[in-house]
Image (tube, coloured by chain):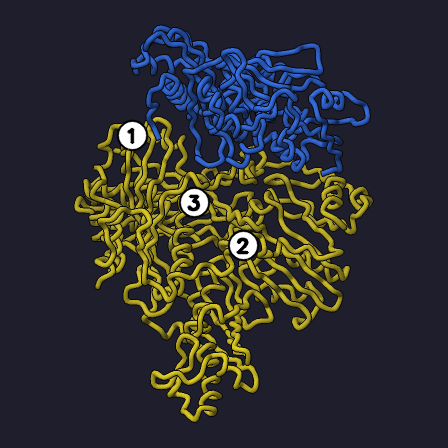
Chain colours: A yellow, B blue
Amino acid sequence: MPIADSIPTDLPTTNRPINAGASMNDNASRLDGVAKVTGAAKYGRDVFPANGLFVAFVRCPWGVGELTSHDKDAAAAVPGVIEVEVNKKDGTYHGATAGYVAAESHQALQRGLRALNCKWKRKAAKTRLEDEIGEAPPVGEAAAAILKDAELKLEAVYSTEVQTHSSLETHGVSIDHKGDSAVVYASTQGTFSVRDGLDDAIGLKRSQYEVVCEYIGGGFGSKLNGAGKEGTTAAKLASKYKRPVYLFCNRAEEHLDTGNRPGSRTRVSMAFKKDGTILGGEVRTWGSVGPNKGGGGCNIPGGRYNLGEVKKEHEDVSLNAGMPRAFRAPGHPQGSFAEELMLDEIALACGLDPLEMRMKLIKAGDIKEMAELGAKLIGWDKRAKTGSQTGVVRRGFGMGVTSWGRFPAKTDAEVVINQDGSVEARTGTQDIGTGQRTMVSIVTADTLGVPLEAVSVRIGHSNLPEGPGSGGSVTTVNSAPAMMAAANDAKAKLLDAVAKRVNAKPEELEIKGGVVMKGGDKVLAWKDACAALGNAVVGKGENTQQTVQADKTKGNSNGAQFVDLSVDTQTGVIKVNRIVAIQSCGRVVARKMAESQIIGGVIQGVSYALFENRLLDRVTGAMVNPNLEWYKIAGPCDMPHIEPVLWTKGATGPRSLGEPPTIPTSGAIACAVLNAIGSPVRSLPLTPDKVLAALEKGRPA
Amino acid sequence: MNPFAIATPDSHAAAQKMLVGRSYKLPVLKGAGIDLVDHLKEGLAEPDLLIDVRRVRDASRKDAVSAEGSGLRIEANATLAELVDSSLVKERCPVVGQAVANAATPSVRNVATAAGNLLQRPRCWYYRNSQFDCLKKGGATCFSVEGENKYHAIFGQGPCHIVHPSNLAPALMVANATVHLIGGNRKSLPIADLFHMPDKGVTSEHSLEPGEVITHITLDAAAKSGFASVKEKQSFDWPLAFACAALSLNGDTIKSATVCAGAVAPVPWMLPEVGAALSGVKITDDTAIQKAAAASITGAKAMTDNAYKLKLLPVVVMRAVLKAAGRDPGGL
């Protein structure tokens, strides 16, 4: 039965068991959920080895600053201060590092930093993308030719602001250095890349140190930078003093100097016909980056719609501000915001329903199917014509689409079956928060044919089998097949041993529900089968670039999202009522984890759409909101009812799920706002001041 | 953060003696400590003694809120949550409960105190960041004038452009409240006199003398009163603008009205023009109420990034009045 038909659309929308039966395990809850909420789970930031040093960076307080004086002797004289290093005189952004202080305690460290008494001379700083773009060049010749004879044209500029990752656990490491060995407790998306990055700094052989990342309090791409300067600085000091070192950023430093999603300006000059056919034109984007170029990409056109012949130009624009880093679908949300709102503006100009118009433009067949289902689930038939409402509170509907590729990453895994029947599943890749432990456990138990409780999971250690960094939504895609291969290998070894004992051929045996069976009859209980082993068996599995690329059946992760919201036209406040998020995800391992991925992506998208904005002081270049008070992130009362739909149709293996669900949310919200109030708000975040200004300005000509 | 001592006096009189004692150079009173800890962490305050008055209350006063004549008495250490939950407040002066229910988060409201809410320092991002040597910290510049002022004041001549952070204060203003003190020459102070504009002293927002301690607050009944605000986020955010209104009605005609705005000026900002325009207006007359609310921006002047507040203020004033009148204020 097509999935669209299997989902009831006539029931109340809350708590509908939408995804029953969609996964290998519908009921398993996050294995470490209780540990996380009770504090039993120890993050790197929670590890304070005895006799450790505390280290913090000296940082430039202005957009551009020159260090004119400091008092190294006074800082070094503070009781408990061990080392003071100032190695730079110039800072080119707020938060740029210029040295460090190491001390016996956090308190001594703070006193030392203050005694250092750095005096920075402030200089003019570049703080605004729009100010630094300069005069935009005219539309290029090819696009001008398309635009010249067009029935209809849209010229518009869309903008987004900088979003910081705002990981709750800040960046850093805690290194328990014991002289001739060390354990590095890192908050990272790449356990193995931290290990690789510390080779020189830590002064030990790889066989002498281990990187541990059992849990991460948020990363979203910002913790893919290997050891980082936090790790290498801490490691050098640990190596020098043969002592533990603790170096974690504080909240302000986390905003300033650990990456961000760059801001963007997108100028579209598009030609289209009255029937909604888009002929093409030009899209010119600018991305706000740090003092150096790079990382400012803005992904429009996103390749999901037929937009005719589009000439694309892009330029990174330097600001005196912290540099971008990969952020959950880098370049995509900002591009998707502009693209989706552009489409709704074109539909409005043509007098077309934006869903109907999109149906002709969407390239992928499954996205069209998802759009049909999404329209039913959100109640698209209740959508009023754009600009037709007159009440104080107006309702709006909007939609957006998404897609993501499937990327290979080499992964090794092991499954150990012990003689007492216990099973250990081992792979070194960390859990960025997606539920890696739970996934590994389910795949292993399912493959072996034993209950979930029989399997214990070890992940997030650099002395375990090597796996990928959590970036590009590759973790489950690549580690599930490796885990399955390892479990199959271990099972084969076990069954070999059992077969000899019970006078059967191994291929005649199977394991179901923790029992070894032959031809439907019970042969041995799992425990007795394992007791027959001479040594524990170790099954090995791997997933290679070749195996991923060879499998053509496992392709993109596509999706569609639908938004229902209300706008208070007197105050400009937006209340998002519901979001339906349909996401193809191949074979789902754990339903709750998968739904949680989609919900999390939507939450981050809502927050990006409505609130988040790194604000630089236009005079001093300092970030005025390096906190979670004025850097606003959506809270519980801002949450819509979110309905994730797992689209499992026609897929045999796990697909990417981390990044795609956060791509279309902000654009779909912006479209819904246009539908509600009749005029577009072309700039994120969609704050009340901008909504009121759009209402005043009215519908564009 | 430097080491400090914590004292736990058992009465306001004992706390007051510690404030004026000579053994500590910089003693400060601590209520819940919400704002104070922010100051300690950012290095904005370095007291050597915290005098914890969170649990200090007149021995004869069991309840956070009690009846005082036809009005109310609120203890200094009443928590915001206690004000929200109080049936006396709901009955006699609903605007007080509505205003504080809109502040902060449940966990903050469970500990934050009434006196602490009145005396908390502003949330201006330049003031709160120790690297900006602003007027409030004895510096020469208000950085908001040339810089980022989206959340700053639209009233007042400066030189500092903070908005007063208290949700409770404007509610108390429309209920004609009195703040009761010990430790100085005054026994009490009208709530309006507790605050002063920056030109009367920029390093402090209140007019308490050193050594004066708030013991409790009394206020008149304002049964027909209401609150309305606009916030960007609906969880844990500071209002962009809010208003408190108290009406005296004769049937469905407004005899007199008192309206006070918040988040728009360095002090709770009384709106006498609105009150005057509401006098004699029927509570069902939307046009007249809207016209009166439009008077709220008399004398307002936007900074570079906060002109939107000129649009929001009349809306929250109108909604507060409608709510006070028992009508549906509309909106989200």
Q: Amino acid at mark 2?
A: Lys
A364 lies above or below B58: below
Residues behind callouts 3 and 1 on a single chain = yes
Res A23 visible = yes
State how far apart marks 2 and 3 are (Cα): 36 Å
Kindly identify which residue carries mark 3.
A264
Q: Amino acid at mark 1?
A: Gly
Q: Nearer the viewer, residue A562 or A521?
A: A521
Q: Amino acid at mark 3?
A: Ser
**A138 to A480, vertically: above or below:** above
Mark 3: few/some/many CA within 10 Å (<14, 14-19, 20+): many
Q: CA distance from mark 3 to mark 1?
A: 24 Å
Q: Secondary structure at mark 3?
A: strand
Q: Are marks 2 and 1 on the same chain?
A: yes
Please give the chain letter of the residue carrying mark 2.
Answer: A
Comes first in the chain, label 3 or label 1: 3
Looking at the rendered image, the disc whose residue lies closer to the viewer, 2 or 3, is 2
Characterize the local packing of mark 1: few (<14), some (14-19) or many (20 or more) Cα atoms within 10 angstroms.
some
Give the label on residue A36, or none: 2
Q: Secondary structure at mark 1?
A: loop
Which numbered disc flags the more N-terminal residue, 2 or 3?
A: 2
Given residues A482 and B226, the one toward you in this image is B226
Label 2: how many Cα within 10 Å (few below 14, some 14–19, many 20+): some
Tally the numbered discs. Answer: 3
One can see residue A308 in this view = no
| Residue corresponding to mark 1 | A698
Give above or below for B280 relative to A681: above
Residue A341, quarter of picture: top left
